[in-house]
Image (tube, rainbow, N blue to C red):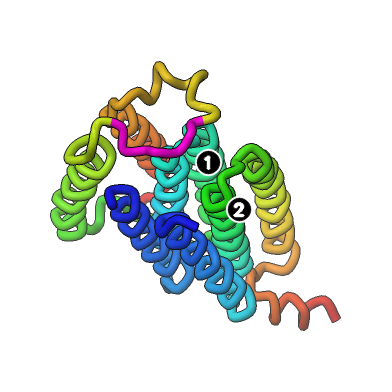
Amino acid sequence: MFNELQALLLSGALISACAYALFSPKVSGSLIALFYGSFSLGLIFVLFGDSLLGLLQMATFAGAVSVLMLTVILLTGESTLHLGARKSVLVLAVPLLVFVAVGLLLVTGLGGPENPNPYQDISSGVLLFIWQQRPWDLLILVMAFASAMVTITNLFSRES
Amino acid sequence: MQADALTLLSTGTILVFMGIASIVMSKNLVKTIMSFQVVLFGANLALFASGLGIGSRLTTDSFVLLSITVGAAVEAVGLAIVLGVQRKYGTLDPSKVRKLRH
C-alpha cells in the first residue's frame, strides 16, 4: 500500500513536470520543469530499490544535461532569464518549495514501515553511506543542484 | 505484476507517447531535444518497471544504465547540432531552416 502510494505520487509529479516542460510556451520554464522531472525519475529509481541508477540519473540529467541545455538556451537567445524581475513569483515559489520538501520528507522517510521497500536492492551496498534511511541527504543533494543552477543562471543572465 | 510496477509502466508509456507527440508538433529545435529527453525518461521508466514486475532486475537495470549514458551523449551531440544550425541559419524553426537551405 505504501509503495503504491509512493508510485502514484511520484508518477503524478513526473507526468505533470514533463507535460509542463513539453507544452509550456517559454523555453526557460520548460527547462526548469524538465529539471524537476529528471529529479522525480531519479527519486523513483531510488525509492524502488536502485539507488545507483537514481543517483546516476540525477547527476546526469538533473545536473549535467540541464546545465548544458541552459547554456544552449542562453547562447541561442531563446530566453533572457531575468531572475530579479519577478518578486511576486518568488513569494509564491518559496512556500511551494518548502511544501514540496516537506512532502518529499514525508514520502521518503516518515510515516511508513521500518523498511518500506520489499524489493531486493542490488546496488545500494556501495552507496549505503549516502542513502541509509536518511532523507536529509537527498534534500542536501537537491539544494546543491538548485544552487548550482541558480548560480550559473545568474552568471549568464543579461543586464536589464 | 504488482500494482506499483503497473503504475510505473503506465507512466512510462504515457511519457513516451507525450514526447513523440511533442516531437511531431514542435517548432523549436531545443524543444525537440527536450521532447527526446522525455521519451528517454519514459523508456527508462518502462524498462525499470518491467524489471520490477517480472522480478529479475539485473538485466533491465543494466539496460537502463546503458540507456542513461547513451541518451545523455546523444543529447549533448543534438544540442551541439542545434547551436550550429542557429549560427548558420539564424533560426531554430525546422521549417524555416528547410526553406533557407534551398
Q: Name the residue under label 1.
A: A57
Q: Which residue is drawn at 28% across and 52% down?
A: A1
* Residue situated in front as seen by the camera: A82 or A63: A63
Q: What stretch is highlighted in magenta?
A: A115-121
Q: Main secondary structure of the magenta part?
A: loop
Residue furthest right in the image = B102
Q: Horizontal and vertical percent for residue B6?
A: 47, 61
Rounded to the nearest whole Å, what is the CA distance between mark 1 and mark 2?
14 Å
**Residue A105 position by quadrant:** top left
Residue contact between numbered discs 1 and 2, judged by CB atoms under 8 Å: no
Looking at numbered disc 1 in the image, what kind of residue is underneath it? Gln
The quarter holding residue A14 reads: bottom left
In the rendered image of this protein, does residue B72 appear above or below residue A115? below
Residue at 23% over, 36% down? A113
Would you say B16 lies left or right of A115 here?
right
Residue that mark 2 sits on: B47
Image quarter hosting the C terminus of chain A: bottom left
Any part of residue A155 in sight: no
Residue A100 % position (x, y)? 23, 49
Q: In which quarter of the image is residue B70?
A: top right
Crowd tier of the residue under label 1, counting other residues whose Cα lies within 10 Å: few below 14, some 14–19, many 20 or above: many
**Label at residue B52:** none
Comparing marks 1 and 2, which lies closer to the viewer?
A: 2
Q: Which chain carries label 2?
A: B
Give coordinates of residue A15: x percent, y percent: 41, 64
Q: Is residue B82 left or right of residue B14?
A: right
- Give the camera-side residue of A8 and A116: A116
Q: Is mark 2 on a helix, strand or loop?
A: helix
Dot 1: element: helix
